[in-house]
């Protein structure tokens, strides 16, 4: 009989669905849990309001790995995330704890689950830009771009094959070489090769409920100083609209105001629309996610009962 693989918990959900609250509540109930953030913006120091990052007081009581990991003068790519997450998961298990990965950066979850090919010579800025564009524009936009650059390669890649589209665009950017000819790859293995995945998703059954939650939080972010936060960040760092964090929802719109491309009066509506579009794309990911236990926003108790049974938590 094969020994059981150590457990890893995924908690996915669209923005404003309550993922962080669930994760913290699970950590309170099950003290074996350690939280790893799966968020491409929370990883940056100073990106607090626009990313709806947990407060410093909450983080002091309930630490999240990969929150405030680096400063904005650096770039954190999906390859960086994959490497860091694998190291953290290994370390957490070495202390007889259980990792809970929570967030809304679906591509991060996807490459961690399925594994990925990483080019040693990759341009981290370019890769991070592609990753952020997928979150903001959708993978179809990048596939269309690949069609323009190389129809033959594009025709051999399915329009939803995120990893291969990124690799093809990246290699064209780096060397204009044939993606199929690259031999110098580093591979990140699928997580399920070493661990048992317990995957949970928060999926709001009523779109209107999620839209209301998003709108209420958007009011809080604007009133809480979103624009002022971005103004301070642009003073501290040499930031432009090309930085991955500044391409994210809320930060992109606030930067547009600072650059005179958008009026301050329109900031709320533009960021609200962008956030709802982001949530729509996240829900699309969740609908197609294999082996995912989905629960509505108000079904925390049911999800907890299932998790407790699956992992034999006391």
Image: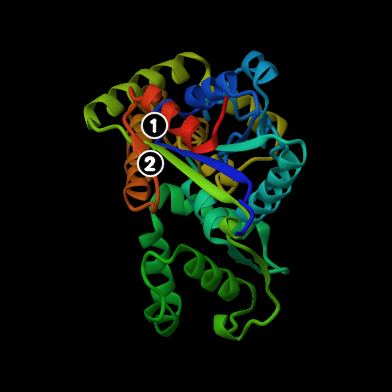
Classify residue 101 by image quadrant: top right
Q: Which of the marked residues, 2 or 1, is nearer the chain's N terminus? A: 1
Residue of label 2: 293
Residue at 60 percent of width and 46 percent of height: 243
Q: Position of residue 261 (x, y in %)?
A: 44, 37
Residue 177 is at least partly visible in this image: yes
Q: Position of residue 296 (x, y in %)?
A: 31, 30
Residue 103 is at least partly visible in this image: no
Of circles 2 and 1, the one toward us is 2
> Which residue, as the protein is rendered here, is positioned at the far front?
1
Per the image, label 1 sits on a secondary structure element best described as helix
Q: Eyeballing the image, is 89 above or below 49?
A: below
Q: Please state which of residues 272 and 299 is positioned toward the viewer in this rendering.
A: 299
Q: Position of residue 248 (x, y in %)?
A: 50, 40
Left or right of 144? Residue 179 is right
Q: Please state which of residues 222 and 25 is positioned toward the viewer in this rendering.
A: 25
Classify residue 177 by image quadrant: bottom right
Residue at 34 percent of width and 25 percent of height: 299
Residue of label 1: 271
Q: Position of residue 109 (x, y in %)?
A: 52, 49
Q: Assign the C terminus to one quadrant of the image.
A: top right
């Amino acid at each position: 009989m094969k020994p059981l693989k150590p457990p890893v918990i995924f908690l996915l959900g669209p923005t404003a669905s309550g993922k962080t609250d669930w994760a913290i509540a699970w950590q309170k109930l099950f003290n074996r849990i350690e939280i790893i953030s799966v968020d491409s913006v929370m990883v940056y120091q100073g990106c607090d309001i626009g990313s709806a990052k947990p407060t410093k007081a909450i983080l002091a009581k309930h630490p999240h790995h990969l929150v405030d990991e680096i400063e904005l003068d650096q770039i954190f790519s999906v390859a960086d995330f994959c490497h860091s997450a694998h190291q953290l998961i290994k370390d957490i298990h070495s202390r007889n704890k259980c990792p809970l990965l929570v967030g809304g950066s679906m591509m991060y979850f996807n490459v961690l689950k399925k594994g990925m090919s990483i080019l040693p010579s990759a341009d981290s800025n370019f890769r991070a830009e592609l990753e952020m564009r997928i979150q903001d524009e959708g993978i179809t936009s990048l596939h269309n771009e690949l069609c323009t650059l190389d129809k033959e390669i594009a025709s051999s890649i399915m329009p939803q094959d995120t990893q291969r589209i990124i690799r093809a665009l990246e290699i064209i950017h780096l060397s204009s070489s044939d993606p199929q000819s690259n031999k110098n790859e580093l591979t990140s293995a699928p997580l399920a090769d070493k661990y048992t995945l317990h995957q949970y998703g928060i999926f709001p059954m009523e779109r209107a409920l999620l839209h209301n939650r998003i709108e209420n939080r958007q009011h809080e972010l604007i009133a809480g100083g979103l624009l002022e936060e971005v103004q301070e960040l642009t003073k501290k760092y040499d930031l432009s609209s090309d930085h991955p964090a500044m391409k994210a929802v809320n930060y992109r719109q606030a930067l547009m105001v600072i650059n005179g491309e958008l009026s301050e009066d329109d900031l709320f509506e533009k960021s609200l629309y962008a956030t709802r579009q982001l949530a729509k794309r996240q829900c699309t990911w969740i609908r197609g996610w294999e082996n995912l236990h989905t629960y509505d926003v108000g079904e925390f108790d049911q999800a907890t009962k299932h998790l407790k049974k699956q992992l034999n938590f006391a």
